[in-house]
Structure formats: C-alpha cells, structure tokens
Amino acid sequence: MVRVIVSAAVCPHPPLLVPELATGGAADLAEVRAAAGAAVRALLDPGVEEVWILGAGADRTVWEADDRGTFAGYGRDVPVGLGGTGTGRTFTDLSVLVGAWLLRRTGVRRRAFTVPVDLAPAECAAIGRELAARSGARRVGLLAMGDAAARRAVAAPGAADPDADRYDASALAAVGSGDPAALLGLDPDLATRVDAAGRAAWQVLAGALGNRRYVAEVRYAGTPAEVTYLVATWVPA
C-alpha cells in the first residue's frame, strides 16, 4: 500500500520564530509566526495521522519519534522533540528544530528527513518519491522547512540584489502554484548564490507529491531582516 499524502505546508525556519529566543524582538516576526501556526493547523486538518518534516541538514538523515533537540546553540535551552520518549539521537539542524517546535502541540506521529542544502534537484525528487512509496496507509502531511533568499543586500541593508529578486519571484510563483513541477524547476545554482536554504527541501516535497495538482494558498510572503520567508499550504485539488 502507498501512503496517502493529504496535505503539505511550506514554512521558514528562522530561530527567532521561537519567542523565547527572540526576547525583546518577538514582535518582529509575529506575522510570520502567526502564518506558520495557521499553516500547521491547516496541514493537520484533513485527519493527518503522521507528519514528515522535510529540511536541509548536514547529511541525508532520517530522524525518528524518540529523537530530540534543543535551541541551546541559538541562545537558550528550549527543548523540542518528535513526540516520542526523547531518549534517541540529538538533532541540531535548524530545519528540524523549528519544524519540531511548530508541531509541538500536535499528538500525531512525527519524523523528519534532512538532505544536504546543495543536493541536485533530480536527487531531491528521487528521495521524495522514495518517501512517498514507503509501505503503510497512514494519512500523511508534509512540512517542508526552508527560507528563500537570505542575501538580500549586497552592499548595505536594503540595497538591491537582482539575483535575490529573481530567485524570490520564482520561489513565490512556485510555492503558490500548486504544481510540484514548478518547485522542481527552481534553479539550484541561483539558490546557492542567494543562500536560499529551502530549495532542496521544497524539491523533496515536490518528488513526494508526484504529478498531481494541488490547491495552494500563500499565507505569508515577506522579507524581514533581509531574509525572504514564505508560508503556504497545499491540499489535493
């Protein structure tokens, strides 16, 4: 049996999304935080039984329910987990940490998959297809973590960056399209030039979603603090 993917969401992973880390600047990302929370609720809404967090990491790694992490490396020991005992391995990748934090209030089964940020699109898609083909019949939601351009300023804050503008325009169009092929069309070389950490995770997502069309809703698109964040949800059309 093939797992049934019933919903997907795209969220950014700035550590300051976690209020305990933002201290006095918690309000700066309040709109992003609210949009991400709404996206997670929509992700879970279709009776999801398991959520897979997809993100960039040091290696291609599968993280299971008993694994755990902490934001101690980002200034405060805020522990997060994947719903299990917390006795397993320790994850440190920001994509998994923030994804686990966003899902902290859900009781559904969780696991995470990381891939190198520079993994080629074809390999990302193949990993996504492999994930989707795993045996089982649970209703699965996919949470793809990652930012768009993080190099918005070349010379000074607010300075123009044509490469970042071009990448962000293509990323916003792809994330809002509901078409997995559009996500797979994102340029990996351009993503690298503008430090876009979400490209690989989004293309794993695309591989897992296959050729079906989806109804997409962009819930946030903006560039606070010189980094572009996108929040969106996808459900089967």
Image (spheres, rainbow, N blue to C red):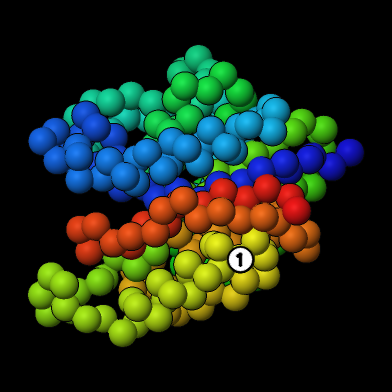
Q: Is residue 94 left or right of residue 178?
A: left
Q: Is residue 201 left or right of residue 15?
A: right
Furthest-right residue in view? 1
Residue 36, visible in the rendered structure: yes
Furthest-top residue in view? 85
Q: What residue would you read off at disc 1? A: 177
Q: Residues within 10 Å of mark 1 (few under 14, many from 20)?
A: some
Q: Residue at x 75, y 53 (%)?
A: 237
In which image quadrant can residue 197 be found?
bottom left
Viewer-side residue, 151 vs 89:
151
Q: Position of residue 79 (x, y in %)?
A: 33, 24
Q: Residue at x 19, y 37 (%)?
A: 26
Looking at the figure, which quarter contains the N terminus?
top right
Residue 131, visible in the rendered structure: no
Furthest-bottom residue in view? 162
Helix, strand or loop at mark 1: loop
Q: Is residue 71 left or right of residue 114?
A: left
Q: Position of residue 62 (x, y in %)?
A: 57, 41
Q: Position of residue 74 (x, y in %)?
A: 21, 39
Q: How many marks?
A: 1
Q: Residue at x 35, y 78 (%)?
A: 165
Viewer-side residue, 194 vs 27:
27
Q: Amino acid at mark 1?
A: Ser
